[in-house]
Image (cartoon, rainbow, N blue to C red):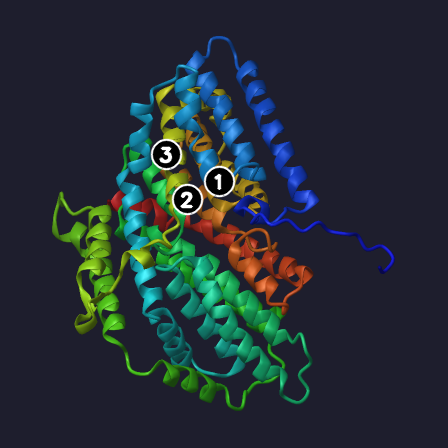
Amino acid sequence: MPPGATTTTTTTSAASPGDLAPAFTPRTRTIRYAGLVLGALAAFAAFAAMPAEVPHEARVVAGVVVLMGTWWITEAAPLPVTALMPLVLLPAFGVTTMEELAPSYASQIIFLFLGGFLLALGIQRWGLHRRIALLVVLAVGTKPTRMVLGMMIATAVLGMWVSNTATALMMIPLGLSLVGLIEDQDGVARKSRFGVGLMLGIAYSATISAFGTIIATPGNVFVVGFIRENLGHTVTFLQWMVFGIPLVVVFLAAGWLVIAQVLWRPEIDELPGGRQLFLHELSKLGRMSAGEKLIALICCGAALSWILVPLVFEDPWATDAVIAMIAGLTTFLVPARPAAGVMVMDWDAAREIPWGTLILFGGGLALSGQVTATGLSDWVGDSFAGLEGLPFWLVLAVILVAVLAVTEITSSMATIATFVPIVAGVALGLGFDPVLLAILVTQACQCAFMLPVATAPNAIAFGSGAVSIRQMVRTGLWMNVIGFGLIFVLAFTLVPWALSAG
């Protein structure tokens, strides 16, 4: 036997799924176990530290907010598991009943995102997203700098309708094939500037796409639901696009300039064979299938309905959520291959819906609803009443900087679910518009560009091997500064205008 080797005992019993589950690293285990304990201790401390005149129910909710926030940040438990805690803890401590909490987990805003998930899965099922990406890049141009722009535009367009993770997973391999072409040219080193710029451009545009539509990311859906349930204001799909689409366009343009013209300008100006590569990839897709045409038609119908219905009807029964569900259900009813009985969508494909994300929405809505119902938000607002004389721009700047720092190391959805109810309470106490601040905080939470752990697209780009952490931090800092400036400008322009127009 070789030195250091150990003997193993072979058993005839089959290993269970639990036995085969992968082990976490020691660091991850330590963070999770510490998070479980610290969350409970911090929750008790929050409950005990609040003044006695604060109602018992509000103190309990404050403790649960701290517990869930700590568990979300440390991922001590799976995010959906933490989101289910209100169903147990709040009734157990006499705050409310499960009957009152359960409807939050089936809010109409959740069905808006469910319908969006079905459309996104339909697009992926028939490969329409790949065709769109290739056509966009060919339309923009195949010079290296234009390739970066084309890939960024294609990623952003897809990311507004398909999850940014799925979009990045589809676009990164296509980008790597371009990197290989560039690095095969004379005078271009491995780990080229083009490779760094293209990978970061894809990752960042997937993140930027989250600003464009309500269904682009879970955080947008959560804040729209929070505003509806707790602040009595409805933000429509069209209203969101009024400020979301311009933000995406300007952010993409600024990001492309920073990446492709300032920090990571490609080594060469022309790429022999670049256009041929895209044409070859497009030719492999063949003619547009019936499934692609039908899912494109359904998606276009949904998008037009989201925009036009509020303009045509004063009080339409077809809300954004109803339109999303009509479109989503239609995919199961329309045959893409009639002779084979194959529909645009089937339930096997629908099993890929991230149900945990929907539970996460519900938990956030349930918790934020109790923050309002128990008077905790009023107490938080009153606590800041002494700062009422501070100008809005200063308060906004401080909040944005704090959120931008936190969201680099935590899940954006967890940050939104934790910060938005608190910031809304602060806004009420200072006499500011809580709807406006809730939206701005949500946008800031999406600006996570500096670290691989900040977002899934960042992690995918880093995993490609073309980008180092140092390069990502350097570029991400620029992107965060741009994001801060754009959100700050929106706070005084398009966002309040869109909200008042509704």
CA gap, disc 1 to disc 2? 8 Å
Residue picked out by circle 1: 79
Picture coordinates of residue 103 (x, y %)? 29, 31
The disc, 1 or 3, on the residue closer to the chain's N-terminal end is: 1
- Report the residue at 48% width, 22% height from top: 62
Residue type, numbered disc 1 = Leu
Foreground pick, 177 / 78: 78
Between 190 and 292, the residue placed more toward the observer is 292
Q: Residue at the spot x=47%, y=85% of the render? A: 277
Please give left or right for residue 22 compared with residue 167 in the image.
Answer: right
- Asked if the residue at tag 2 contacts the one at tag 3, i.e. Cβ–Cβ closer than 8 Å, the answer is no
Mark number, residue 356: 2
Residue 492: percent from left, percent from top: 40, 46
Q: What element carries label 2?
A: helix
Q: Which residue is drawn at 49% across and 78% down?
A: 147
Between marks 1 and 3 in the image, the one whose residue lies nearer the viewer: 1
Type of amino acid at the residue the image marks with label 3? Leu
Residue 317 vertical position relative to residue 387 in the rendered view, above or below: below
Disc 2 crowd rating (10 Å Cα; few below 14, some 14-19, many 20+) is some
**Which quadrant does the C terminus fall into?**
top left
Which mark is first along the chain, 2 or 3?
2
Q: Which label sits on residue 365?
A: 3
Q: Quick check: 325 left or right of 167?
A: left
Name the residue nearer the viewer: 221 or 14. Answer: 14
